[in-house]
Amino acid sequence: MGVDKETNRIQIKNKLQRQKIFAKLKHQKNKQRHKERQARAKEERENPELRDERLLKNVTQTIETKRVFDETINHEIEGGDDFSSYFETTKDPKVLITTNANAKKPAYKFADMLMDFLPNCTFVKRQREYTMKDMAQFCSNRGYTHLVVVNEDKKVVNGITFIYLPSGPTFYFSVSSFIEGKKIEGHGKATNHTPELILNNFSTRLGNTVGRLLQSLFPHKPEIQGRQAVTFHNQRDFIFFRRHRYIFRNEEKVGLQELGPQFTLRLRRIQKGIKEEVEWEHRPDMDRDKRKFYI
């Protein structure tokens, strides 16, 4: 045992002795902490106001609570509304789903999954000679309101494009963490009822635009008797998709059963019209500040 002259700390060369002394100090520290906790609990039982004051001060700091202020939060969309044709009428959406050219089996499986929860949708196999604008024109002429293109690369689905017809805009999302419904433990079997839609935390002006796109994919009136709910939950600019069936057990308790699938979207690009001028695009430097969110 010696003393470090620079740090003025005791140095113990024997490893077993160091571990023994460290464990002893840790035990003493824990014992002192428990004594303080018991004393505080006794004071709070005698005076409940002390507990309320402590809870007000002890607010857990998370990335969300430290979020950089965004002046567009809870602001209405400025200028023209691209989705006014959906919200100003009672007409239900009509969706065409396809894939990229030369797509492999995972792309068709993902498209089949989309058709499972998107009402009133049709799948058409992609023909290589047709461009995105050709497909959009084809859909517009036949009364479709949305064109959805699943992108697959090296047998992995990595992106999905939404085009609001007839004149855009175009949204491109990356896709990750895809889990099929049958691989979820305790999953249920979905029915053909139109699900209810839940959108969480789309608070900025950009988030409102993304939320309105997702909302426009579903009919105005869900079929409540199906007791199915589709959730798009935005957290730190990642959009998590979940689908559940619920049941009211009594006046206070609700049971949930997950139906699947699960996947995560992240907005990468918004373009005006049919893949024309880029209106917003995610850049790598946007991830430097972990407290700055855009949706």
Image: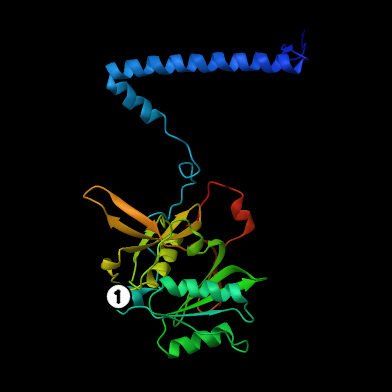
Specify whether 133 is left or right of 120: right
Farthest left residue in view: 251
Quadrant holding the N terminus: top right
Residue 122 location, x and y as percent? 45, 82
Left or right side of 103 for 84: left
Image quadrant assignment for residue 75 = bottom left
Q: Nearer the viewer, residue 274 or 252?
A: 252
Measuring from the top left, give residue 261's x and y in whole percent: 47, 63
Q: Residues within 10 Å of mark 1 (few under 14, many from 20)?
A: few
Inspect the image, locate mark 1, and give the three-letter code of the amino acid beneath it. Glu
- Side (left or right) of 212 relative to 252: right
Image position, residue 152 (x, y; %) = 61, 72
Q: Nearer the viewer, residue 183 or 29?
A: 183
**Along the line of sight, the residue nearer the viewer: 180 or 137:** 180
Q: Which residue shows up at 27% across the image and 48% down it? A: 253
Res 81 seen here: no
Q: Position of residue 285 (x, y in %)?
A: 63, 54
Picture residue at 42% right of the left edge, 33% below the top: 59
What kind of element bears circle 1? loop
Q: Residue at x 60, y 14 (%)?
A: 25
